[in-house]
Image: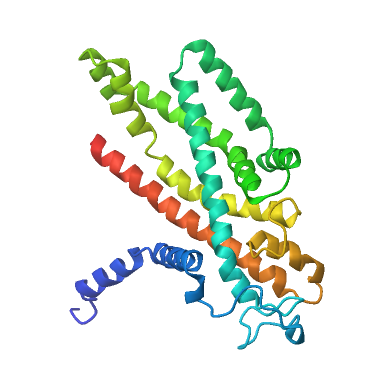
Amino acid sequence: MTALTAPPRSQGVGASLGRRPWGLYAAIAFAVLLAVAAIAPQVLTVHAPTDIDYGAALQPPSTAHWFGTDESGRDLYTRVVWGARESLMIGLGAAAVGVIAALILGSIAALAVKPAAVIVDRFVEVMFAFPALLLALLLIAIAGPSATTEIFAVGLGTAPGYARMVRGQILGAKNSGYVEAATALGHSRWRIVRAHILPNALRPLVAVFALSIGQSIVWASSLSFLGLGVAPPSSEWGALLDAGRAYITQAWWLVVIPGLVIVAVALAATTIGRHLQTSLEKGERSRAS
């Protein structure tokens, strides 16, 4: 019977391996690779994104050109690497605009005097009634396509949903036991808001910001694909999709590969954001207990 019993140590090692967040490790490694591409793209490729070689036009992926070439013979891998800076700048900028706008609107709706809070709350509801992509399209149609317009359009398009979350978090914190205790001790309203309500209510925004980066990059690329974002010959990933759609039947890699990169970025940002969210929730439960 002893020979048939598995060693406890082996079971423990197997269980430990099963619990390791390999998906998170892969997401972090990919995020580091993106950071290198954005900061120092020359480390990952020795070519320039504007190098033209008409003799190598529309070549499929190979050892010479990992991602293939476009209609001008430009190396698609090089263009994807160099486009990481502008794409991530748009994603980070739009996520920052969305979170900051949500913080302002949600805080006013939850903490301001009733008339102002009601007005802001109704304004957020009206904005939330518009599909985010439609709102972004409206703003770009008014201001014109550019990277800056794209950042604000995508950021403001995501802000209403996050504002409602911020409002709910602050209202929940206002009714908590630690706020009631601080009020009973005679602390001023500003001190309660600054020291107790905002730090506890806004902690989840760390995870929301990470999640919003991937979403913003996807939406910004969608706008560029529709011709309402950064225009070719930019190496921004949405612009690569826009430039490659004319050759989709004869050069699939011009659309598929940049699209897969955008999906991979969104998945990495979502994985990291979900892990941050889980860690914050565990921390809150441990503090509550």
Q: Foreground residue, 65 or 286?
A: 65
Number of numbered callouts drawn? 0
Name which residue lies at 35% across and 43% down: 281
Q: Quadrant of the C terminus?
A: top left
Taking 223 as reference, is 194 left or right? Answer: left
Taking 206 as reference, is 120 left or right? Answer: right
Name which residue lies at 21% across and 76% down: 7
Most extreme residue toward the left is: 2
The picture places residue 211, in percent across and down from the top left corner, at 49, 49
Query: Would you place residue 224 above or below residue 104 in this image?
Result: below
Residue 27 occupies quadrant:
bottom left
The picture places residue 225, in percent across and down from the top left corner, at 73, 57
Q: How is the image coloured?
A: rainbow
Q: Foreground residue, 3 or 46?
A: 46
Query: Would you place residue 73 above or below residue 184 in this image?
Result: below
The picture places residue 183, in percent across and down from the top left corner, at 26, 15
Q: Foreground residue, 256 or 153?
A: 153
Name which residue lies at 49% across and 11% down: 114
Q: Quadrant of the N terminus?
A: bottom left
The picture places residue 93, in percent across and down from the top left corner, at 53, 48
Taking 232 as reference, is 171 left or right? Answer: left
Taking 192 as reference, is 54 left or right? Answer: right
Residue 236 occupies quadrant:
bottom right
